[in-house]
């Protein structure tokens, strides 16, 4: 195949990619929607079960043992499948705010997002935070208002709240018919047809009845007395709401809104179709020195997640890399920019949650897994030669702190190793002071619970966690080497190092922090830093 044909082939494959995340407040139905998208995409045969898997059913995307036990998502999952000739890369993210850092990192690796809203509760705290992160990159958002099989708030109230709270224009695409026991289905405002569903949609082959045209007499036969109200609502919403505009959607200024019930398959297939029809293919990426186009020939990508022990039998560690340009090929040699050395990627993986297969090829938009023996960290850039640097993956200052020590002194080495790997993975932030004391920092208490559970199960370490008097952490950035030496010498008792060796000021209270900032007025006390950044 000549050079021109290869380039044409690459352009075609990139255009066929859709890479998106599903985001929501806890319990809005995010993981259920993920399952149903996989179901309609043909990736699984029954919701809650991977194809051909005979073990007890659980959500495909919730693969960690503790996720199955608690019924929550605590780690992002990557799932790739083919649908209507396109390759879908779906990333399910933790909804719980204690794991928001993992979600923020995932949002740097996608081109669009589906926002799930509980129709009874409306816009919730975590939804607001996540949309703010999406807005930083103008990520296009599709909204799914879930749980209309229950008694919930009116659709007009929900639209008004989304627009006022999230400051984004809503363009309803489907409209619910009733709610709770009288939920009949959804009416598609653009195609002018009603999709009639029956509850209990666990199987893919349960097709819905389509009724063309809102004036169809068949509707009056099915739901006598209900349809005049629907016709009035449709006329009202078409006149009062903004029509869908794909350019505004791609700019992150407008969100198309779908109503339904994920658990019963109401409105799910329409979400999948909208992603194919409207969501953008892989977009150019800022690499500091320039923007990298997805169809460029040289391979490039960045690590946005590291997961330890996906297969506890092999004690493996996988680095998740978003491909930004070019084509991955088995055995490809790339430049590891942070370490300034060449590395070979021999057996990259593609995923269905924790089920993985060897990847024979991947292009921009795809997520591949690289076996990691400590050489890769979150934020690392890999490139075929050029000195690129994909940035923007943040660490946030933790709000809770504990000191950790092994209950068995002879297992201190395993504790240090486990915490280092979990710290590199982003499950918790790990700091070490001059006395060698291990300090853990987290956004929420549940992070500590998960770390304790995983240390015990994966590293066979039973640790003791003791509260410490630390108010917050700040990364220090010095104007010159002399100031650095003076500050570190004087503030030794309050200084620790993070997993990358960066100096961190641990303040005991807000007054202590204010005094330190006043004392070292030329030093930056940062509440965030980028992964891989050396201060």
Image: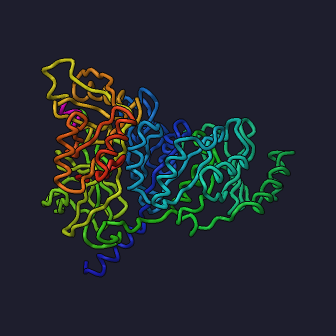
Does residue 309 appear anywhere in the picture? Answer: no
- The quarter of the image holding the N terminus is bottom left
x then y, percent, for residue 122: 63, 42
What is the chief secondary structure element of the magenta stretch? helix
| Up-down relation of residue 345 to residue 179 (above or below) | below
| Nearest to the observer: residue 242 or residue 144 | 242
Q: Residue at x 24, y 49 (%)?
A: 377
Q: Nearer the viewer, residue 516 or 396?
A: 516
Residue at screen point 29% across, 22% down:
465
Q: Position of residue 349 (x, y in %)?
A: 27, 51
Residue 307: horizontal and vertical position, in percent? 29, 42
Question: Is 56 placed above or below 198 here?
Answer: above
| Quadrant in the picture for residue 463 | top left
Q: Residue at x 50, y 48 (%)?
A: 37
Vertical placement of 334 versus 318: above or below?
Answer: below
Please identify the residue farthest to the front as the structure is shown: 519
Quarter holding residue 512: top left
Residue at image point 41% right, 33% down: 444
**Residue range of the region highlighted in magenta in the rendering:** 416-421
Residue 65 rendering spot, x and y as whole percentages: 36, 30
Is 419 colored magenta in this rendering?
yes
Vertical side of 483 occupied by 386: above or below: below
Q: Is residue 137 left or right of residue 291?
A: right
């Amino acid at each position: 195949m000549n050079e021109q044909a290869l380039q044409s082939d690459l352009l075609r494959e990139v255009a066929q990619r859709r890479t998106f995340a599903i985001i929501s407040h806890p319990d809005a139905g995010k993981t259920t929607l993920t399952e149903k998208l996989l179901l309609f995409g043909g990736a699984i045969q029954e919701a809650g079960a991977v194809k051909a898997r005979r073990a007890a059913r659980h959500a495909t995307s919730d693969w960690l043992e503790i996720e199955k036990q608690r019924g929550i998502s605590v780690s992002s999952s990557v799932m790739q499948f083919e649908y209507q000739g396109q390759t879908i890369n779906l990333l399910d993210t933790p909804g719980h705010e204690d794991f928001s850092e993992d979600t923020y990192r995932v949002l740097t690796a996608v081109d669009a997002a589906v926002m799930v809203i509980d129709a009874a509760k409306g816009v919730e705290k975590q939804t607001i935070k996540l949309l703010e992160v999406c807005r930083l990159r103008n990520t296009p958002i599709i909204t799914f208002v879930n749980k209309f099989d229950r008694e919930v708030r009116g659709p007009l109230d929900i639209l008004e709240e989304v627009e006022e709270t999230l400051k984004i224009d809503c363009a309803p695409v489907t409209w619910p018919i009733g709610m709770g026991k009288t939920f009949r289905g959804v009416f598609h405002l653009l195609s002018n047809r009603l999709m009639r569903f029956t509850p209990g949609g666990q199987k893919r082959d349960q097709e819905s009845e389509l009724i063309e045209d809102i004036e169809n007499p068949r509707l009056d036969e099915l739901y006598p007395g209900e349809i005049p109200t629907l016709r009035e609502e449709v006329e009202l919403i078409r006149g009062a709401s903004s029509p869908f505009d794909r350019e505004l959607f791609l700019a992150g200024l407008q969100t198309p809104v779908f109503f339904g019930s994920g658990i019963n398959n109401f409105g799910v297939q329409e979400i999948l179709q909208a992603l194919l029809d409207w969501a953008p293919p892989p977009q150019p990426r800022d690499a500091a020195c320039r923007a990298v186009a997805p169809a460029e020939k040289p391979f490039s990508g960045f690590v946005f997640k590291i997961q330890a022990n996906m297969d506890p039998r092999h004690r493996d560690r996988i680095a998740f890399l978003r491909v930004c340009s070019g084509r991955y090929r088995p055995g490809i040699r790339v430049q590891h920019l942070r370490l300034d050395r060449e590395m070979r990627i021999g057996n990259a993986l593609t995923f269905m949650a924790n089920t993985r297969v060897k990847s024979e090829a991947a292009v921009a938009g795809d997520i591949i897994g690289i076996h990691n023996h400590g050489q890769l960290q979150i934020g690392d850039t890999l490139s075929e030669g050029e000195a690129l640097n994909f940035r923007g993956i943040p660490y946030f200052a933790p709000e809770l702190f504990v000191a950790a020590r092994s209950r068995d002194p002879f297992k201190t080495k395993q504790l240090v190793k486990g915490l280092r790997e979990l710290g590199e993975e982003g499950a918790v932030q790990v700091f070490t002071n001059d006395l060698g004391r291990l300090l853990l920092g987290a956004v929420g208490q549940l992070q500590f619970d998960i770390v304790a559970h995983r240390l015990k199960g994966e590293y066979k370490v039973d640790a003791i966690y003791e509260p410490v008097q630390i108010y917050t952490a700040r990364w220090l950035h010095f104007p010159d080497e002399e100031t650095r030496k003076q500050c570190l010498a004087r503030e030794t008792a309050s200084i620790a190092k993070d997993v990358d060796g960066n100096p961190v000021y641990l303040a005991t209270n807000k007054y202590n922090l204010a005094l330190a900032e006043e004392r070292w007025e030329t030093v930056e006390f940062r509440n965030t830093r980028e992964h891989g950044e050396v201060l």
